[in-house]
Structures are given as C-alpha cells and as structure tokens.
Image (cartoon, coloured by chain):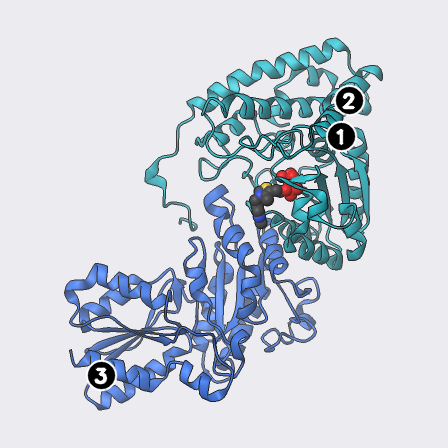
C-alpha cells in the first residue's frame, strides 16, 4: 500500500485505536479540524468525542492529563501542535512522566506526538528539533522516524510501550515521503536503528529528515569512489549502540548528521560513545554536521544556510575519507 | 480495611455505633494519628538525625485531609499535597511505612527512590506528588477523565496549598477540568503562607475560591479547622462530581502551625497569628465536640491516645530495622524491565 509519512502515522494511530479501546487522543484542534497538519483527519467522526478530545491551548495540561489518564490504565496519545510548544509542557514531561516509574513504580504509558523540523519557512517557533532536550532525561524514550514505514511501525510500538515516548514527526516529511508500507499490523522496535544503506569506507549516522540528505550524499560519494554506510537511528533514546558500533568496526570513520543545532545535540553523545568504546577502530575523528548554534531563522536564504545540506555533508565526508 | 485502621481496637468497637459516632471516632483517630506520626518525625527523629532530607508537616491542618479523605471510595483516586499525610492512613498505609519512607529505607513506599511526602501507590489509588507545586492538578484532571472514560462513578481528589494556585499548571488544570466537566474535587488548604510568602503577596484576590468562577467552577469556603465542616463541604463537592456535573473547589481556611519545613523557624510569621490559631486546633476542637455530643467518652479518647503512642515505638523500630536500598539497584527501574 502506498502511503505518505503523514498517512502512515494516521494509519498507525487508527489501527491502535481499533485494536485497544484504552487508546485515545487529545490535543489542540485534533478533532473537528483534524489537526493543524491533518494527521488526525477523520478520526473524530469515526471514533467519537470520547476518544478524540479537543483541548484548550494548554500544553502542560494536555501532557498532565495524559499522565493522569495513563496512571488509571488508559493509553493516551497527546499531540503538540508544533514541537516548539512542547517546552510549555516541559515540567510535566521531565519531572512527572519521566520519573514515576523510578520513584514509585507507576507506569506512565503516554505518547506525545510533536511535529518538528524546519525547511518550511516556519521561523524560530515552528521549525525546531527539540529532541535533545529530552534525551537528557532518564525515563523518556525519544523516537524520530524518517520513513513512512517506520513512522507507522514506531507510532504503534510507542502506543504499546509502557514508558513515556516522545514521537517527533518531521513535518517536512509529512507529504514529501510516499512509499510502499505493509498493510498488516506491524511494529518497529523502539531502540533499534536501521542500516539504510550499506557501505565500507565511512559511516553516516543520522535520523529524521536528514536521512535523505545522508542518502543523497552517499550516492554522490559512491561516484567518487567512497562507499558510505548510512545508519538511520530511528530512536535517539535509547541509542542503538550495537548497530552503530558494528558499523564503526567495519568502516572506521564516522560522521554524525542531524538537523538540530550542534551543541548539546545527539551527535555529541554518539561521538563520545564511539570514542569511549571503539577508539581503536577509528581511523579519523568522529565528525559532526548539524545546524549552527542559532535560532532557526525565517527568511529563505538564512534558513537554507542554517539547515544541514548535501554539500556540507560532502565536505566533511570527503575530509574524513581522506584520513 | 487498611492496616492503620485495623491497628486500633477503640475504633473497631465503634463500628456498630451510629454513622455520626463512627465518623466522630474515625475523624479524631486519623487526625491524631497524623499529628503523632508527624510530631515523631519532625520533633524527634529529625532532630536525632534519623530523617533524610526535608520534613514538611500539616500540623494544624489535619482536618482537611481527614474531612475530605473520609469521602474517598476505594475506586477514587487521591492526589495529596505535602501536608496531607492522613490520606495515606485512610487508604491503609501503615505508619511504619511512612517512617521508613522518611528514613530512606526499602520499607518506605518509594523504597528509598524518593523521600518524605513524595509517595504514591496505584494499588491504593494514591498518586505521588512531584516537587513542582500544582503539577498534579492537570494530572488529576486526566485521571478523572479516565475514570469517566471507563464508565465509573469514581472521582479524583486533588489537594494543594494557596501558593500552588499561582502556578500556570493550576490554572491550566482547572480550566481543562471545567471544559471537560471532569469529575474532580479540588481541595485547597489555604494556610496563608507559602514558605515565607504571605497570601497578599501571592494573590490580589481575597480568596482562592474567588478564582473558581472565572473558570466556571463552583466553589465554597469552609473553616478548614473544623473537620465536620470540611467533611460536609467536600461531601457536596464529591456528590457534584459523581453526578457528572463537573469539578468543584473547596477552599479550607487554616493556618500552618509550623515553619515551612523542619529547618524553618518561621520568624516571619507574627507571633500573635500562632497564638490566635492555636486556639482553633482542629483536634482539640473535634475532641471536645465529639465528647460533648456523646460520640466518645474521655476514657475512649485516653485509650485512643495510648494506643497510637504505643504503636509509634514499634513502627519506628520496624522502620529503623528496614534495610537501606542496595546501590547495585541504582540504575534499575528507570524503564520497564522485561
Ligand atoms: C514550582 C515550585 N517552585 C518552588 C517550590 C519550592 N516550594 C516548596 S513548597 C513551597 C510553598 C508552597 O506553598 P503552598 O502551595 O501554599 O503550600 P503549603 O506549603 O503552604 O502547604 C515552595 C515555594 C516548589 N516546590 N515548586
């Protein structure tokens, strides 16, 4: 079945709602309007007001209510209209949801869906990639699917997971990615990376929309005689060390690529893990390509300069290959 | 029946009496138990260096968790604040578990993972607060929505202080509750101070209850040091919520008869306020009234006091014998372990 990234998420939500009567949705404008991006279009009509709950503009209350409902045995899926507003719910996520199990053995099976990412001229407050704010909080799982197939499999896995899962869906991919996805009931395991392209000479570790930048770069590198392996992390917390390390042992050169800004990003964590556990296998420094440490700018030339692109990946990859 | 309830034979003998007499005894018992456990923790164990971390007590406010908590059905879910220890006893938590909790032992409700009043147990339908004031307000709204979702007549009870009502979470939570007509009872203990901050620096309206109409939520103000008055008001609130009419706020006027925590001498509180309020002690008041109305005799009361006191030593000994958590388990239980 052909599905866009967006349709794949909707299909995943829909199937889980059909499968488990404890699953329900809450968020702003998700009912009648079907969500700012129409991910939940048609769901109110099908599932009714009880299970598709339009809320006030109150992100902290949305997440808090999701936590409360989950403590009572439901499986809420909360939508942030844009991931940029997730910080309004920061305390609920990092202090309430993340710590219940450790503190007092209470399970908080919530999913927070958050449309993230730039490239749509959304400016500083509709373009961010805040995943690293949450990978620093033990108790949370953080998922960033890149493909339609994974988007469906991961949203289903997230809903079935007994821990809080943040699901960052890249809005630049919503309608851009269309691919064949299985029609059946499948999940994609949280915490497991995928080798998106096999290669021998260097590894590009990435996730989210940058997967496509990495694959384009790998294609060009191939013509230059450099065989690049591309790893799609899919989950950034927990990180799939095994898949990364297997690739490092093979290629001995690693470049980490993400759309989020550089400092304190997921790339730094991956670089240190590799340095700590696979130093002997390295033939060059672990390099990073990420957005510069600025807010996401609005105007087209600025945003283009901000977002990591194929040229910037190629520049670093060539330098790395030359080591 | 909970272990704390089972512990006192005086009470058991009362079970055949009138509902008023049973309430009188229960109310007195739970208030006294809370006072005694907190006194032991704050005035003895803390000073002996046996308590880890901070100690926040509800001395003078016992009528609030007791008056409200005695309405809670087993399927209702409770969100205590840090000054509502009696709720745990009403739900059957034993004092020894509380002592162990404050000592950081595995016998505490959080097995040493968290301290003091940060404790909960979903088997008892008690949700643990986090430190951030008012964070549990929206959580209680979601829990209440879930109770309705499941088709029950159960409700949520959320407890907080006056200071907590300044936080955004409180307002977001009340608004969501109102819009959703969530079956939740909000119980405010307005003890007139938030740490060192007096009410007039916390809010420009006279009462916490004044905030409720702005959200379309009915509210009432009650003498928080009168356990029967609290019980009646919360009874109306609970009935309202159970009938599907939505949230309800009860503001209980009271006074914090201690510092903010055990380390705080509360020099900022005018002494005359303490004097004034010590004449309105909820336990003394209720005890006098219950005896005057013939629900208990002076002898019953003496026996109740003795039994509670006797139980304390054994409970503290049990807690002190409870092992500390094993550092080998430090990194466990962050995520579900399969
Ligand atoms: C968000 C937040 N800020 C600051 C604190 C520190 N703090 C702990 S209790 C407290 C006062 C709370 O006052 P109130 O809500 O009136 O409850 P009370 O202690 O009087 O029962 C403060 C400021 C906190 N716990 N949470």
Quick check: A166 above or below B250? Answer: below
For disc 1, does the CB lie below 8 Å from ligand 1? no
**Residue found 62% across the figure and 14% down from its top:** B307
Q: Is residue B308 left or right of residue B25?
A: left
**Residue found 69% across the figure and 64% down from its top:** A56
Q: Which mark is residue A318?
A: 3
**Residue found 47% across the figure and 74% down from its top:** A295
Q: Considering the numbered disc 2 on the image, is that residue within a helix, a strand or a loop?
A: helix
Quick check: A22 above or below A256? Answer: above
Image x and y of residue B195, in percent: 61, 39
Q: Residues within 10 Å of mark 2 (few under 14, many from 20)?
A: some
Q: Are marks 3 and 2 in contact (CB under 8 Å)?
A: no
List the residue tagged with mark 1: B225
Q: Nearer the viewer, mark 1 or mark 3?
A: 1
For disc 3, does the CB lie below 8 Å from ligand 1? no
Q: Colour of chain A?
A: blue
Q: Quadrant of residue B76?
A: top right
Image x and y of residue A101, in percent: 48, 47
Chain letter matching colour cyan: B
Q: Which mark is residue B285?
A: 2
Q: Is residue A59 left or right of residue B200?
A: left
Q: Are marks 1 and 3 on the same chain?
A: no
Mark 2 and mark 1 lie on one chain; the one further toward the N terminus is: 1
Q: Are marks 2 and 1 in contact (CB under 8 Å)?
A: yes
Quick check: A310 above or below B135? Answer: below
Instruction: Please state the chain letter of the residue tagged with numbered disc 1 in the rendered image.
Output: B
């Amino acid at each position: 079945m052909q599905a866009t990234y967006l349709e794949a998420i909707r299909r995943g939500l829909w199937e889980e709602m059909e499968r488990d009567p404890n699953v329900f949705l809450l968020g702003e404008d998700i009912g009648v309007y079907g969500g700012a991006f129409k991910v939940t279009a048609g769901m109110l009509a099908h599932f009714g007001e009880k299970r598709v709950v339009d809320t006030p503009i109150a992100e902290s209350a949305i997440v808090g209510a999701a936590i409360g409902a989950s403590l009572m045995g439901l499986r809420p899926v909360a939508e942030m209209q844009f991931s940029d507003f997730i910080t309004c719910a920061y305390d609920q996520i990092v202090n309430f949801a993340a710590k219940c199990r450790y503190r007092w053995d209470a399970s908080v099976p919530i999913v927070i869906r958050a449309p993230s990412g730039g490239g749509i001229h959304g400016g500083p407050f509709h373009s961010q990639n805040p995943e690293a704010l949450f990978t620093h909080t033990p108790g949370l799982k953080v998922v960033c699917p890149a493909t339609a197939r994974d988007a469906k499999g991961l949203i289903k896995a997230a809903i079935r997971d007994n821990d809080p899962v943040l699901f960052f869906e890249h809005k630049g991919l919503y309608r851009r990615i269309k691919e064949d996805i299985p029609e059946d009931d499948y999940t994609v395991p949280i915490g497991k990376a995928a080798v998106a392209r096999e290669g021998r000479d260097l590894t590009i570790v990435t996730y989210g929309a940058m997967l496509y930048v990495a694959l384009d770069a790998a294609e060009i590198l191939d013509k230059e005689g450099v065989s690049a392996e591309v790893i799609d992390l899919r989950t950034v917390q927990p990180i799939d060390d095994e898949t990364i390390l297997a690739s490092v042992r093979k290629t001995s050169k690693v470049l980490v690529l993400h759309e989020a800004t550089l400092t304190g990003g997921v790339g730094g964590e991956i670089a240190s893990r590799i340095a700590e556990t696979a130093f002997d296998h390295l033939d060059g420094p672990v390099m990073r390509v990420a957005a510069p440490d600025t807010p996401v700018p609005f105007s087209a030339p600025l945003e283009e300069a901000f977002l990591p692109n194929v040229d910037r990946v190629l520049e670093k990859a060539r330098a790395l290959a030359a080591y | 029946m909970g272990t704390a309830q089972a512990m006192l034979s005086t009470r058991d003998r009362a079970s055949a009496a009138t509902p008023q007499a049973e309430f009188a005894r229960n109310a007195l018992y739970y208030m006294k138990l809370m006072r005694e456990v907190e006194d032991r923790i704050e005035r003895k164990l803390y000073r002996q260096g046996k308590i880890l971390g901070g100690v926040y007590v509800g001395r003078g406010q016992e009528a609030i968790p007791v008056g409200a908590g005695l309405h809670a059905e087993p399927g209702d879910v409770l969100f205590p604040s840090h000054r509502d220890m009696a709720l745990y006893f009403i739900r059957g938590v034993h004092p020894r578990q509380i002592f162990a909790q404050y000592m950081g032992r595995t016998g505490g409700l959080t097995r040493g993972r968290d301290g003091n009043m940060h404790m909960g147990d979903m088997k008892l339908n008690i949700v643990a607060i986090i430190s951030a004031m008012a964070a549990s307000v929206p959580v209680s709204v979601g829990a209440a929505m879930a109770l309705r979702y499941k088709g029950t007549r159960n409700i949520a009870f959320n407890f907080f202080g006056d200071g907590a009502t300044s936080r955004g979470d409180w307002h977001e939570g009340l608004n969501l509750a109102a819009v959703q007509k969530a079956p939740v009872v909000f119980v405010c203990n307005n003890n007139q101070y938030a740490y060192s901050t007096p009410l007039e620096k916390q809010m420009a309206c006279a009462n916490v209850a004044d905030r409720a109409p702005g959200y379309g939520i009915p509210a009432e103000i009650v003498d928080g040091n009168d356990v029967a008055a609290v019980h009646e008001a919360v009874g109306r609130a609970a009935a309202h919520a159970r009938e599907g009419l939505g949230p309800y706020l009860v503001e209980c006027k009271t006074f914090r008869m201690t510092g903010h925590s055990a380390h705080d001498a509360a020099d900022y509180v005018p002494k005359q306020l303490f004097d004034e309020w010590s004449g309105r002690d909820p336990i003394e008041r209720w005890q006098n009234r219950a005896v005057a109305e013939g629900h208990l005799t002076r002898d019953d009361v003496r026996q109740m006091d003795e039994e509670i006191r006797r139980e304390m030593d054994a409970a503290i000994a049990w807690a002190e014998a409870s092992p500390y958590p094993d550092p080998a388990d430090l990194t466990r239980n962050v995520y579900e372990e399969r």
